[in-house]
Image: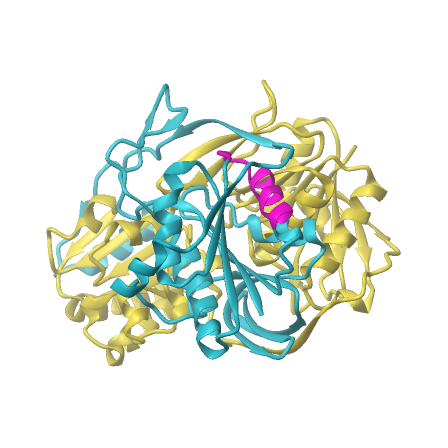
Chain colours: A yellow, B cyan
Amino acid sequence: MPVLVYIDHADGQIKKTSLEAACYAAKVAEMSGTTAEGIVLGKIQDDPSSLGKYGISKVHHADNADFNHLDAQVYTKAVADAVEATGADIIIFSHNISGKAIAPRLSARLKAGLVTGAVAVPETTSGFVVKKSVFSGKAFAKVTINSAKKIVSVNPNSYSVEAKGEGSAEVVSLNLTAAPSKVKLVSTSKVTGEIPLTEAERVVSGGRGLKGPENWGMIEELAKLLDAALACSRPVADVHWRPHHEHVGQTGIAIAPNLYIAIGISGAIQHLAGVNRSKVIVVINKDPEAPFFKAADYGIVGDAFEVVPKLIEAVKQLKSAN
Amino acid sequence: MKILVCISKTPDTTAKIAFTDNNTKFATDGVQYIINPYDEWYALVRAIELKEKDPSTVIHLVTVGGADAEPIIRKALALGGDEAIRINADSQDSFYIASQIAEQAKSGGYDLIFTGKETIDYNGSSIGGMVAELLDMPYVSLATKLELNGTTVTINREIEGGEEVNEVSIPVVVSCQKGIAEARIPNMRGIMAARTKPLQVVEPAQADTLTSISGFELPPAKAGVKLIPADNPAELIRLLHEEAKVI
């Protein structure tokens, strides 16, 4: 029985988080001596056969117009139909926005045990054990799925995307009847020109140490130079210096980028909980006692207003040298 | 309008996270418990705001937990719930918990069922979706705004890099997050009133447990910070490029 992975897309393009899920699914399939197949719902510009590069052998594509707006109820039935059609007993999602909407419903529908936020491939020596992030990143739990069908959703940025040669997946069209949608899409607003936080490989984040929203120009410039997303601490979002969607931490968004640069953030435990899975943490703070330095890989004790402009120059020089 | 708010008991956000019994159990010694912040600040408070606009609204609270969950549910009543139900069971399996809530909700005739977007302990983000599926209701996740017009609910929900506005008829299950409600704290009158509000304890229904936790581990300790002099930020950029290879 194949491993089935839900392939999510936005604006016609396959999301990076879904490529991570595809690579994870390919690895799980390899471990179980089977193949990995994908399910794509709705119109897509990217060629689904390109998933072959990531170890997906076959893609089931249901191209109905009904699948052009995420309605968890409708999508869940469609994925359940695909599970039935393929006979899959392991289903993989990204723990992204669509995964959070669909995977729990599918779990209840199929009575398939679910682990959300997986950070590693399952251990299968005794049972099916998935390591997941718990206590908002402060610990990991090993969760055993005891049911015959199993669903795992993979934490964004926890499993790396690696293309394996030039493989091409077979694309078959899947004829699904969509359930009538009870959720009507009224409008969509996207912050254009910004990298979504949960998908960002690099994040530049500012805190109260920046003294006011008018001082974010240099943060934005540094982020832009590094192709980084912008983030902020909770106090900054609470006083509306920055929009809520930039708030990272225990009660905001939890992220795990390759690089997290915290500027003027002291590093309260609630903030650390949302960012401590970042691979490299840089802290710039004028207070040498700031708790964040204990969680950092690199640090500069200094005034952000002096340090950041120099960093910007250094990045520009690095870019012109390469 | 009848609203059910799902409440979970979680360790305080500043609690020290440690494990006992060969790393198989959460160390509860000295841990303070709170209402899961997403359940309190967003799901419950939005329900209370809706009741303030329309006083005929009834808010029921439900939690799945032992008697030790009662202080939490009393606090939620003090904030503004009308009645509470505690389902007397202890489980870490989302499907089991969702099955209990769905079983309760089935006979409750709820128009809106609210959950927080996740709990801050097991970070499952699962209960809302599972309850919706078990009740065959639509589910709108990660809501940042919710308005009610008659039987139509207008909900803003997060999408990658923005948000979208959805319209859905009741009944609907919604997972709530930042933006949906204003902050508030319980007042003395609420605390006094909560003592006499009904808190019903019911025994769990038969339900499957699909997962179990076999152990915990803590993340590896950091090797220690490498400090770079403030007058030489270029060195930081060099290290990020050549040593850490992240830029």
Left or right: A195, with B21 as reference point: right
Left or right: A250, with A3 as reference point: left
Instruction: Report x, y in % for residue B147.
Output: 54, 77
Q: Is residue A4 above or below residue B46?
A: above
Instruction: Report x, y in % for residue A65.
Output: 80, 69
> Going by the picture, which residue comes out furthest to the front?
B196
Q: Quadrant of residue B236?
A: bottom left
State how many labels appear. Answer: 0
> Going by the picture, which residue comes out furthest to the right?
A175
- The residue drawn where x is 35% and y is 32% is B218
Left or right: A21, with B143 as reference point: right
Any part of residue B202 in sight: yes
Main secondary structure of the magenta stretch: helix
Instruction: Report x, y in % for residue B86.
Output: 48, 44
Q: Is residue B53 above or below residue A250?
A: below
Any part of residue A165 in sight: no
Q: Quadrant of residue A22?
A: top right
User: Quarter holding the N terminus of chain B?
Assistant: bottom right
Let me know if residue B97 is in the magenta part: yes
User: Quarter holding the C terminus of chain B?
Assistant: bottom left
Let me know if residue B161 is in the magenta part: no
Instruction: Report x, y in % for residue B192.
Output: 29, 59
- The residue drawn where x is 45% and y is 33% is A141
Question: Which is nearer the eye, B200 or A109?
Answer: B200
- The residue drawn where x is 28% and y is 75% is A216
Q: Which residues are magenta?
A: B89-104
